[in-house]
């Protein structure tokens, strides 16, 4: 099967692989450069929507403040669910961002690998009430 590509005016060059995807370097997690997958959820034949573009712009403008404002929420979740006491600096070694996903409804979230739950991972996501939540990746997906 041939890969499909699109040059989106906001996301840039994306490849279709079950959703629209690209890899992007980020610097907002612990100060080090990391690569994450940027994913605009879509079914075969769907294009990236204007709602997803707006969400991606929100992410690009606000991700640093989102992380800063929700670090305590992530720490609380890890403490309550994995009985783990982690410092705000130690969290950068315990969970690793892998993907930023933009849903069709405009919500977006960051999916993390987690040493405490390698199978499920965790997510920090903006829910449909425009509030930030932390849960398993499946809670967001």
Image (tube, grey):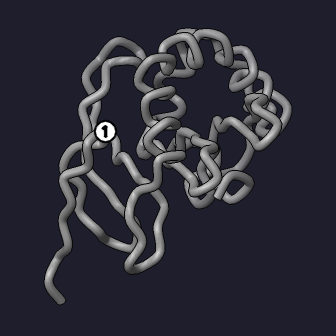
Would residue 121 appear left or right of 54 to someone viewing this image? Answer: right
Indicate the quadrant containing the N terminus: top left, top right, bottom left or bottom right.
bottom left
Name the one closer to the observer, 69 or 61.
Answer: 61
Assign the C terminus to one quadrant of the image. Answer: bottom right
Residue position marked by numbered label 1 in the rendering: 10
Labels in figure, total: 1
Residue depicted at x 46% and y 67%: 42
In the picture provided, is 116 more to the left or to the right than 30? right
State the image coordinates of residue 106 (x, y, percent, origin top left): 60, 45
Horizontal side of 46 relative to 24 (left or right) equals right
Q: Residue most toward the left?
A: 2
- Nearer-the-camera pick, 65 or 31: 65
Q: Position of residue 109 (x, y in %)?
A: 58, 40
Residue at the (55%, 11%) spot, across then down: 65
Disc 1 crowd, CA 10 A, few/some/many (<14, 14-19, 20+): few
Query: Is residue 82 positioned above or below 15 on the image?
Result: above
Residue farthest toward the bottom in the current orientation of the protein: 1
Q: Nearer the viewer, residue 50 or 117?
A: 50
- Asked if 102 appears above or below 33 in the picture, the reply is below
Say above or below: 3 vs 113: below
Secondary structure under tag 1 reads: loop
Q: Quadrant of residue 85?
A: top right
Q: Residue at x 24, y 55 (%)?
A: 14
Counting from the top left corner in percent of width and height, residue 113 is at: 50, 45
Q: Is residue 56 left or right of residue 71?
A: left
User: Residue sitting at 27 percent across and 37 percent down?
Assistant: 35
Residue 104 lies, with reference to residue 90, above or below; the image says: below
């Amino acid at each position: 099967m041939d890969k499909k590509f699109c040059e989106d005016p906001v996301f840039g060059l994306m490849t279709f692989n079950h959703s629209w995807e690209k890899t992007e370097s980020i610097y907002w997690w612990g100060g080090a450069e990391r690569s994450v997958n940027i994913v605009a959820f879509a079914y075969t034949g769907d294009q990236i929507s204007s709602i997803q573009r707006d969400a991606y712009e929100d992410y690009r403008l606000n991700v640093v403040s989102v992380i800063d404002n929700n670090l305590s929420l992530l720490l609380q979740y890890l403490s309550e669910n994995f009985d783990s006491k982690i410092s705000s600096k130690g969290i950068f070694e315990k969970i690793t961002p892998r993907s930023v996903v933009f849903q069709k409804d405009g919500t977006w979230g960051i999916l993390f690998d987690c040493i405490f739950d390698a199978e499920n991972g965790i997510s920090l996501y903006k829910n449909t009430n425009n509030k930030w939540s932390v849960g398993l990746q499946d809670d967001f997906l």
